[in-house]
Image: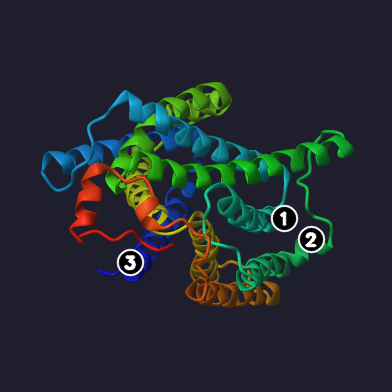
Amino acid sequence: MTSQNTAVTAITSYCLSSILMTLTNKLVLSSYDFKLNFLLLAIQSVICVITLEIFGGLGLVSRRRFSWDDGKKWFIVSASLVAMIYTGSKALQHLSIPLFTIFKNLTIILIAYSERTLLKGPPVTRLMLVAFLMMVVSSIIAGWADLSTGKVLKPTDSDSDMEWIVAYGWMLSNCLTTAGFALLMKSKIREVGFKEFDTVFYNNLLSIPILVVACLLLEGGEAQKFYEKYSDPERPSGEVYGLAIGILMSGVSSFGISYSTAWCMRVTSSTTYSMVGALNKLPIAVAGMIFFNDPVTFGGVAGVLIAFFAGIVYSHAKSVQPTAGVKPASDLPLPVNIKADRDRGLYKLANA
């Protein structure tokens, strides 16, 4: 399989698994008003590790043996992932979804230039910048109904001036941690030489203690409410079983997205990964309009169409992107077994 076909397959895999994960959460977990986000993520990580070990025991997949040296190098990636999730949830507590989406799309530009500067990645062309700006415009148009009425901050009891500082502070933190996660993961994959299942194993295993501690420190009150709600003997047992099945389904879905994320990040750039993540919201938005009775508005439809064309522009920009100044694949740090395969002409590094 050529490097281009590999990248397309990886991106497709990431899109499908992300959509499945989103729909699973929307269809099942949201029905039970489950608000323990860190606990859910910890359970998903545990399921991913167990699933990987089962597949490994059956001889279906292989991964590196755990080493503390690799764990120390990868820990910062897992920590940045948790930080990205936490700051995103805090930003959403204060900002409206349209404004949050605008900032997330602006983060793609930050990632693109940071990757070029810090990781010596491919140059950011004018056509790519046009695609990024089209994504920002699409989110502005889609959320114009809320933005034009000033509904950018969610109502709270705190002082209005301080609320602006807190809201945008969390949003800035989320933009920085999102860019940090994308760049760190790409950098560490190169440095450690992880393959997909190695990345899945270390990312989920090292995330578990961080997520458990975050749950204990930040979700204690919500956990008490959840326990009181579901420990009621009069509550139908079918609801408890349904929630358990929903969490199990989300865990299985998270294995798919963990693998496809690692694959997509290895064979493409951090910028492409972030752009695909933004574009991946389009089929979800369309599905919401068709299947979940989400309001169909002119702004919503126009935003989807503009974002769709932004994806086409970005794809074209990548196809004609100059490679001058990009570090050649032969100079990238690779594990010994991959270098040997490369020397025999059996391995080709994807040209992101």
Q: Give the x, y percent position of residue 196.
A: 30, 48
In which quadrant is the C terminus drawn? bottom left
Q: Are marks 2 and 3 in contact (CB under 8 Å)?
A: no
Q: Earlier in the sequence, mark 2 or mark 3?
A: 3
Visible residue check, residue 319: yes
Residue type, mark 1 in image: Leu
What residue is pinned by disc 1?
99
Q: Give the x, y percent position of residue 18.
A: 42, 57
Image side of residue 88 versus residue 325, left or right: right
What residue is pinned by disc 2?
147
What residue is pinned by disc 3?
3
Between circles 2 and 3, the one closer to the viewer is 3
Tag of residue 289? none
Q: CA distance from mark 1 to mark 2?
A: 7 Å
The residue shown at (45%, 32%) is: 39
- Give the quarter of the image for residue 163: top right
Q: Nearer the viewer, residue 174 or 245?
A: 174
